[in-house]
Structure formats: structure tokens, C-alpha cells
Amino acid sequence: MAAFDAEEGIISPGGIGFDINCGMRLVTTNLTYREVRPKLKELIDTLFKSVPAGVGCKGFVKVNKKEFTDVMLSGSSWCVEKGYGWKADIERTESYGRIDWADPSKVSEKAVSRGIDQLGTLGSGNHYLEAQVVHAKHIFDPETAKAFGIHTPEQVVIMVHCGSRGFGHQIGTDYLRVFEGVVKKYNIEVRDRELMCAPFRSTEGQDYYGAMACAANMAFANRQVILHRIREAFEKVFKTPAEKLEMNLVYDVAHNIAKVEEHEIDGKKKKVVVHRKGSTRAFPPGHPELCKLYRKAGQPIIIGGSMETGSHLLVGTEQAMRETFGSTAHGSGRTMSRAAAKKQVHGESLQKAMEKRGIYVRAVSMSGLAEEAGMAYKDVDEVIETVHNAGISKKVVKLIPCGNVKG
């Protein structure tokens, strides 16, 4: 996370990340593991067929350039208007699923061509769709958990992690090249090409900011379409409408994004460009940007671990506003490179071992599965204890995986 003065500071694609608005979405159900377990394989198989995953995968939502421009401008709202979601989903999404300074005129044709077929796709790498179980011993804050829709021991929830796919990556690539000239123009020195930047208020900086917002909106829409497919899969497997299954969105949080926010610095309110790469918002109770539903409790924070160990739901704090510009960790983080993981882990063996432990996994690629082995990641519980004890976010619930779809 980094924050720069909104008038005199910079903006950096590398400081934001190339998978713009790679984020997390958590969905509740009123099903218990006892009810889901007999149909777990059928459910994960159905989700695997319903949500395209892997490198270069294409989504089922077909749009023309005009419609894709609408997606860039409207994000989640476009999806709900087209029937891919519920109105309540918008309220439960960061920024209500739409960044309003998006400017499609600042997006290249190459980026559009890469993104136009990717609505409703999971992608590859560390992106996933996971069925998880809430055990009674892992509910640390029952009152906040209930406010977030988690109320029953052994309750099953669904978590999604993905972003703007090739669309956001191309925008990042395009502007990294533009900024190579910009740093010379403005006499800015950088030690790493990945940290190329531009003055935030410069024409080039504002062009990127508008293009980045287009990718962020596409990512919100992408996760919204995936949520629609998840609800359809549950309806098919459990022969019950999603509404009756109480498949409510808890929240959608963004990573890899920059926003102008007001924070107190040296006792004075100041507008800064907050870059969050490898971090996510952690806004406290009462924050004006939170929806009414969560204004009393605080912002839900979804932190992914690994497909073998579990993930966490936390809540934002005032201390985060004071110390980290309202930010906390976004995941457990890798301890091992993908190449190193593949040398030590055999995908098919890992899949079988996980199934023996009660985690049914469907993956597009066995080598991709090996890359995401639990041993390649930090201990998520240690990460959570660190941010909890630091006071920049507070534990609410730990979520244990029981089924997973990987790209």
C-alpha cells in the first residue's frame, strides 16, 4: 500500500498491479455441510462447467463493443440490469460496483479485444471459486458474523477470487510503456521499470486513472456474472431457488486499485491517491463510504489463504484509518515461486490427497493446481493473527474449504 498527495504526487500502474481490481467476493447460503456433503461432487462439477476457468477462457456473456463500453462505465449495475444479479448485490459491493471516473476513450483497442469475451470467467493462477464451511469454533465475533449473514455452525459459503483478466493486464501494459516516456518528460527517477509512474494530475496520469477505472468496473461485472452462475448452479443441484437458499452476497472487496481518499495526516485532513496492491480496504464502523447495511458493524474484509488451509472474514477498524490509510492485507502471500512449487508437488497426487481430506477439487490444469499447493503459501492463520493483533482489522470468522474450482 502507498499513498501520494493528490495534487503533487504520482500514480503508478506497477504500484497498483496489472490484474486491476483483482478482488474477493463472499456469498452465503442457508445450507449446512451435512446437506451439501452428499452432493458436493455434483455441485463442484456443475460450478466447474458453469464458470469458465483457465488461460484464455471465454465467458458465456456475449457483448458487442457498445455493450462492453457500457460495462466499462457501469460495472455491476450493467449486469443487474441485464438480469445477472440482484439489486441487493450492488449495495454489498465496494464503491457499489462502479468507479464513476471511468473513461473508455483512454482504453486501447487491443485491451478491448482481450476483454470483450471474458465476462464471467475465473482465469488462472491464484484465482479460484471455493465452497467453504463455517465451524462453530471458528466464529470469533458472533455478533459481527451475524450482521454479515453468517449465523449457523457448519453453514456453507462460497468465495470467489478473480479480477479484470487480460483486459486489465493490457491496460497496465499499455500505460507502463506510455510512462517510460513520461518519467523522462517530468524528470522522475525510478529504480525498476515496473515502478514507472506519472504525476497524478498530469494528462498521462489522468488518462491512466480513467482507463484503470474501466478495468475495475469490468472486474466488478466479471465477479457479478460469476455470482449469477453460482446461484444457477446451486438451483440446479439443490432444486431450490437461490432466494430460498439465502444466497446473499456478503461483500465484494477490491485489490490492485487506486482511489483518491481523504485521510488525516499530521492532524489535518488531506486527499491522497491510495494505491492498494497486495492490500485491501479496511474501513471502520461509521465510515461514510460504507453502505447502510454495514455502517454500524464496519466493512467486511475477505482474506484468502490457500485451497488447502482456509480463508478469513474480518472487519475494518479505526486503527487502520490512523495507521495504514484504511488498509489491511489481502491474502496470505506466497513463500515459494510457482516454478519451485511445481518441482515439489505433483498435481494429480495433490488432488487425490486433498480429496482424502474432504476437499474436492476440479482444475483445468494439474500443473496449475501444483502451483497453488498450500505449502507454497504463508500460514494464513499467522497472517490473520498479525493484522488482528496490530489492530488494523479484526477477526470475525475462519472459513474451511470443502470444494474448489481452479483455473
Image (cartoon, helix red, strand yellow):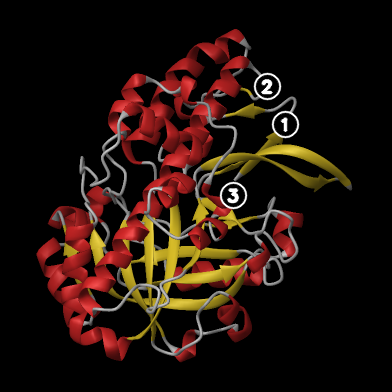
Which element type, helix, strand or loop, lies under badge 3?
helix
Q: What residue is rendered at 50% in x and 32% in y?
A: 212
What amino acid type should be assigned to the residue bearing mark 2?
A: Arg
Residue 406 visible in this rendered orientation of the protein? yes
Which quadrant of the figure has residue 308?
bottom left
Looking at the rendered image, the disc whose residue lies closer to the viewer, 3 or 2, is 3
- Say left or right for 380 vs 241: right
Which element type, helix, strand or loop, lies under badge 1?
loop
Which sits earlier in the primary sequence, circle 1 or circle 2?
Answer: 1
Label 2 sits on residue: 201
Residue 9 x %, y %: 69, 28
Looking at the rendered image, the disc whose residue lies closer to the viewer, 1 or 3, is 3
Label 1 sits on residue: 6
Count of residue discs: 3
* Vertical order, 94 against 361 (above or below): above
What amino acid type should be assigned to the residue bearing mark 1?
A: Ala
- Circles 1, 2 touching at the beta carbon (< 8 Å): yes
Q: CA distance from mark 1 to mark 3?
A: 19 Å
* Residue placed most toward the observer, 12 or 35: 35
Q: What residue is rendered at 40% in x and 66% in y?
A: 305
Q: Residue furthest top?
A: 185
* Residue placed most toward the observer, 180 or 143: 143
Q: Residue furthest right?
A: 267
What amino acid type should be assigned to the residue bearing mark 3?
A: Ser
* Residue placed most toward the observer, 68 or 151: 68
Label 3 sits on residue: 95
Which quadrant of the figure has residue 224?
bottom left
- Circles 3, 2 touching at the beta carbon (< 8 Å): no
* Vertical order, 214 against 97 (above or below): above
